[in-house]
Amino acid sequence: MKRLYSIFVLGAVLLLASCQTRVVSLDKPFERNALELYQKYTFQLNDASIVKMEVLRIDSENVYGKTKDGSQVVIKQSDIREARKLDILSSVAVVLAAVAAVIFVPI
């Protein structure tokens, strides 16, 4: 039973970590309306660095935001390789569906 519990917890963590919506990528180029203001995004830049921030403003060249510790960040749109938005509601729904499937579907 303990092994089943640890597998379940690991699966739930993986599901929560993987439920992110990719809004900008190499296949989906950056557009002005691709990002929502005051939402938290994870940006991967062309130099492979990762920046997690809340988007405050977007202009024709830059994306302005602040990180969790309160520092202001300015990222050039041309430097953004990928932008992901964490979708907690769908993550919770996927985890609940997986738990329901494990409980109610006989093996």
Image: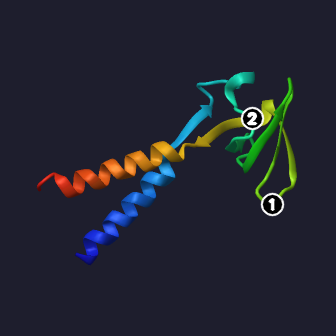
Q: Position of residue 50 (x, y in %)?
A: 71, 50
The colour scheme of the drawn protein is rainbow
Does residue 38 appear to the left or right of 3 in the view shown?
A: right
Residue at figure coordinates x 46%, y 47% from the top left: 91
Residue at figure coordinates x 67%, y 24% from the top left: 29
Residue 31 visible (yes or no)? no
Is 10 located above or below residue 100 in the figure?
below
Residue at figure coordinates x 86%, y 27% from the top left: 59
Q: Which mark is residue 91?
A: none
**Dot 2 lies on which element?**
loop
Residue 94 visible (yes or no)? yes
Name the kind of residue labelled 2 in the image.
Leu
Residue at figure coordinates x 75%, y 48% from the top left: 53
Q: Which mark is residue 37?
A: 2
Of the pair 43 and 47, the residue shown nearer to us: 43
- Which residue in the structure is indicated by mark 1? 69
Q: Position of residue 89 (x, y in %)?
A: 49, 44
* Quarter the N terminus occupies: bottom left
Q: Quadrant of residue 8?
A: bottom left
Q: Quadrant of residue 10?
A: bottom left
